[in-house]
C-alpha cells in the first residue's frame, strides 16, 4: 500500500519503520508545519493513518474524505466529534476505522475483561477499579483505552452505572467505577483492572513493552480497511479475523 502518515511523532515514525519492513510505501509524512498534499500527489495514496492531535481529527477526516481516501484514526481524545466524523464517512462513502488502542494484545485484553466482568457480576462482594500509567508527555488522562475498558465493564457489571475519572471528592458512590491515572517517566502504557473483596484481590494487567504493538495493529487496520465503506472499530476487525 501507499500510506500517508498524519502525525510524525514517535508513533508515526514507528508505523513508518514497520510499514517499510512489510513492503509498504510511505507516500507522505505530515505534521502541523507540513504544506497541504496536492490533489495530484494524493492520487497514489491508498490509506491515511492518523496519529496526531485530537483537534486535528475532524479537519483531516474532512480533507481526506473529500479525496475518497480511507482512514485509520489512532488519535485519542476526539470522540466528542464522533457524530461529525460519522456524517463525513457517510457523505463521502469512505471507510474509516478508529480505536482508542490498536494493539492486538489490548483488544484481546478487552475481550478477557468483558468475560471477567460477566463472571464478577454474579458476586457483589467484589468491587472493581481501573488504573492506568503512561509517560509524562501523554496529553489525555485517563487514557482512551482505560475509558474503553470501563465502558466494557459498565455493559456487563450491573452494579456499576457511571465512570468516575477524576479524583474522588470524599467517598465514592457504590455505582461508580473509579478510573485513575499516573503520568511519569517513559512508561509506554500499563492498564490494570482490579476486582477487590475483603477476602482477596484479582488483578488483570496489560503492559505494553514498546510502541510496536500499536503500530502493527494500525498497519493491520490499514490493510483491513482498504476498499471498505463505513465506520468501523477495532472490535469489527477482531471479530472478522476470528470468523475467517
Image (cartoon, rainbow, N blue to C red):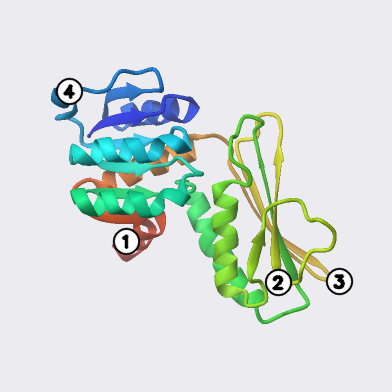
In this figure, which residue is indicated by the disc labeled 3?
Answer: 198
Judged by depth in the image, the label closer to the viewer, 1 or 4, is: 4
Q: CA distance from mark 1 to mark 4?
A: 33 Å
Q: CA distance from mark 4 to mark 2?
A: 53 Å
The residue at 75%/69% (across/down) is 127
In this figure, which residue is indicated by the disc labeled 4?
Answer: 41
Q: Within 10 Å of the Cα at label 4, are there few (<14), some (14-19), or many (20+) other Cα atoms?
A: few
In this figure, which residue is indicated by the disc labeled 1?
Answer: 240
Q: CA distance from mark 1 to mark 3?
A: 41 Å
Judged by depth in the image, the label closer to the viewer, 4 or 3, is: 4
From the viewer's perspective, tell me whether residue 129 is left or right of residue 56.
Answer: right
Query: What x and y, as percent, mark residue 106?
Result: 52, 51
In this figure, which residue is indicated by the disc labeled 2?
Answer: 175
| Count of labels in the image | 4
Upstream in the sequence, badge 4 or badge 2? 4
The residue at 31%/33% (across/down) is 22
- 41 above or below 236? above
Q: CA distance from mark 4 to mark 3?
A: 62 Å
Q: Work out whether residue 11 can be spotted.
A: yes
Upstream in the sequence, badge 1 or badge 2? 2
Query: What x and y, as percent, mark residue 220?
Result: 34, 44
Query: What x and y, as percent, mark residue 72?
Result: 34, 42
The residue at 27%/22% (across/down) is 36
Upstream in the sequence, badge 1 or badge 4? 4
- Secondary structure found at label 1: helix
Judged by depth in the image, the label closer to the viewer, 1 or 2, is: 2
Q: Nearer the viewer, residue 6 or 217?
A: 6
Upstream in the sequence, badge 1 or badge 3? 3
Q: Within 10 Å of the Cα at label 1, are there few (<14), some (14-19), or many (20+) other Cα atoms?
A: few
Amino acid at each position: 500500500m501507499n500510506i500517508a502518515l498524519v502525525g510524525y511523532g514517535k508513533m508515526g515514525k514507528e508505523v513508518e519503520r514497520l510499514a517499510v519492513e512489510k513492503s509498504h510505501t510511505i507516500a507522505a509524512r505530515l505534521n502541523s508545519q507540513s504544506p497541504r498534499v496536492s490533489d495530484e500527489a494524493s492520487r497514489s495514496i491508498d490509506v491515511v493513518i492518523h496519529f496526531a492531535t485530537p483537534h486535528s481529527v475532524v479537519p483531516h477526516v474532512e480533507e481526506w474524505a473529500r479525496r475518497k481516501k480511507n482512514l485509520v484514526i489512532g488519535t485519542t481524545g476526539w470522540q466528542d466529534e464522533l457524530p461529525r466524523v460519522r456524517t463525513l464517512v457517510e457523505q463521502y462513502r469512505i471507510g474509516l476505522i478508529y480505536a482508542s488502542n490498536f494493539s492486538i494484545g489490548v483488544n484481546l485484553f478487552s475481550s478477557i475483561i468483558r468475560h471477567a466482568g460477566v463472571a464478577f457480576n454474579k458476586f457483589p462482594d467484589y468491587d472493581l477499579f481501573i488504573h492506568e500509567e503512561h509517560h509524562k508527555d501523554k496529553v489525555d488522562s485517563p487514557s482512551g483505552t482505560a475509558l474503553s475498558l470501563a465502558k466494557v465493564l459498565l455493559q456487563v457489571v450491573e452494579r456499576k452505572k457511571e465512570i468516575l475519572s477524576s479524583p474522588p471528592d470524599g467517598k465514592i458512590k457504590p455505582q461508580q467505577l473509579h478510573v485513575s491515572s499516573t503520568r511519569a517517566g517513559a512508561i509506554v502504557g500499563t492498564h490494570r483492572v482490579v476486582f477487590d473483596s475483603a477476602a482477596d484481590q484479582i488483578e488483570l494487567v496489560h503492559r505494553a513493552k514498546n510502541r510496536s504493538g500499536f503500530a502493527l495493529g494500525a498497519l493491520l487496520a490499514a490493510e483491513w480497511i482498504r476498499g471498505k465503506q463505513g465506520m468501523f472499530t477495532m472490535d469489527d476487525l477482531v471479530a472478522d479475523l476470528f470468523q475467517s
